[in-house]
Image: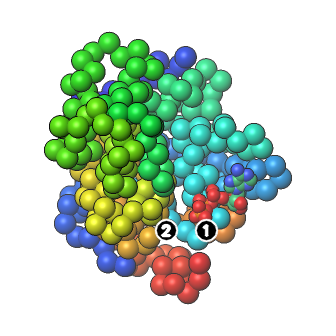
């Protein structure tokens, strides 16, 4: 599968020291940038003037205590907050050199380029094949659907386990397999960015570990932005970490090793060492 960026297509406490290091050390283009981003639910501000650049083909973790705005920030990136009536967004989220909140951006086209995986695996009550092919059909994909389904299931490290049961229901799979099916569904439309909102918190440790390995592989090809409550997970799998604290303030954003080993901000150190949050 190829990745392309085209503005036009939008219109209508242990840091892992192996593979992440190579990625973290090399320069990366910016995939997504928030500029002066404020988000409100009614009168309540959930994101407080956040500016940050998220690098391409890296894993960026968003961490912080409950209610600090991590999910709200994530949902801004592919405009999932549009679905929440009382939510108002001020400022820019740039993707492919364009503000995704520009009036000529089609949110459905945007979400093909910026896919999303949720906390609870949510396959459709359809066959494994149809789960993966769903987005392709909606977008009027005129290529080889079976080939793309196979590539996507391989990309989600699920193919070997399901290749002989593609017509079985996705709901018959285990929780971890269902989550990898959801990842296959997210990558089938050939996105550039994958947003993950606590993708392992509903899974047992073995299934969670498989997803962590998969996230590392996905970053070879995609930009991965993950919300996690699990600081060890952030330390293990991410290249960059953004720490949000109460009120939607982005307090510190840096290489993951720096955040976990030598943060600039006392509040971040206190949070990471469990003094609050
Ligand atoms: N749909 C909504 N309507 C009203 N307020 C909301 C809505 N979603 C979130 N909020 C509020 O916005 C703030 C940030 O919430 P958000 O879910 O983004 O935080 P979070 O850091 O992801 O929390 P958690 O880790 O518990 O999921 C909270 O005060 C929350 O109550």
Measuring from the top left, give residue 16's x and y in whole percent: 26, 70
| Mark 2 neighbour density, 10 Å: few (under 14) some (14–19) many (20 or more) | some
The structure residue drawn at horizontal position 62% and vertical position 27%, both measured from the top left corner, is 102
- Report if residue 220 is visible in the image: no
Q: Quadrant of the C terminus?
A: bottom right
Up-down relation of residue 192 to residue 145 (above or below): below
Q: Number of labelled discs?
A: 2
Element under disc 2: loop
- Residue at which label 2 appears: 229
Up-down relation of residue 63 to residue 264 (above or below): above
Q: Quadrant of the N terminus?
A: top left
Measuring from the top left, give residue 183's x and y in whole percent: 36, 44
Contact (Cβ within 8 Å) of mark 2 with mark 1: yes
| Mark 1 neighbour density, 10 Å: few (under 14) some (14–19) many (20 or more) | few
Measuring from the top left, give residue 197's x and y in whole percent: 49, 54
The structure residue drawn at horizontal position 32% and vertical position 12%, both measured from the top left corner, is 142
- Residue at which label 1 appears: 66
Q: Is mark 2 within 8 Å of ligand 1?
A: yes
Out of 16 and 230, give the one closest to the viewer: 230
Residue at the extreme right of the image, as rendered: 43
Ligand 1 rendered quadrant: bottom right
- Report if residue 39 is visible in the image: yes
């Amino acid at each position: 599968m190829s990745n392309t960026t085209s503005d036009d297509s939008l219109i209508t406490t242990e840091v892992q020291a192996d593979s992440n290091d190579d990625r973290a050390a090399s320069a990366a283009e910016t995939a997504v940038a928030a500029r002066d981003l404020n988000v409100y639910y009614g009168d309540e501000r959930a994101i407080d003037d956040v500016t940050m650049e998220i690098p391409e083909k890296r894993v960026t973790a968003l961490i912080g205590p409950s209610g600090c705005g991590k999910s709200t920030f994530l949902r801004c990136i592919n405009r999932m907050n549009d679905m929440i009536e009382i939510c108002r967004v001020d400022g820019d989220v740039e993707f492919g050199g364009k503000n995704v909140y520009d009036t000529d951006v089609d949110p459905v086209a945007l979400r093909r380029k910026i896919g999303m995986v949720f906390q609870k695996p949510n396959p459709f009550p359809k066959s494994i094949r149809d789960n993966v092919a769903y987005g392709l059909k909606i977008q009027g994909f005129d290529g080889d659907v079976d080939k793309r389904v196979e590539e996507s299931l391989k990309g989600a490290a699920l193919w070997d386990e399901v290749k002989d049961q593609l017509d079985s229901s996705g709901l018959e799979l285990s929780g971890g397999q269902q989550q990898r099916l959801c990842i296959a569904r997210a990558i089938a439309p050939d996105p550039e960015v994958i947003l993950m909102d606590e993708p392992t918190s509903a899974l047992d440790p073995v299934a969670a570990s498989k997803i962590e390995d998969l996230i590392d592989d996905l970053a070879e090809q995609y930009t991965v932005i993950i919300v996690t409550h699990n600081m060890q997970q952030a330390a293990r799998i991410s290249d960059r970490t953004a720490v949000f604290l109460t009120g939607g303030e982005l307090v510190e954003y840096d290489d993951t090793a720096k955040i976990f080993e030598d943060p600039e901000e006392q509040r971040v150190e206190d949070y990471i060492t469990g003094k609050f949050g």
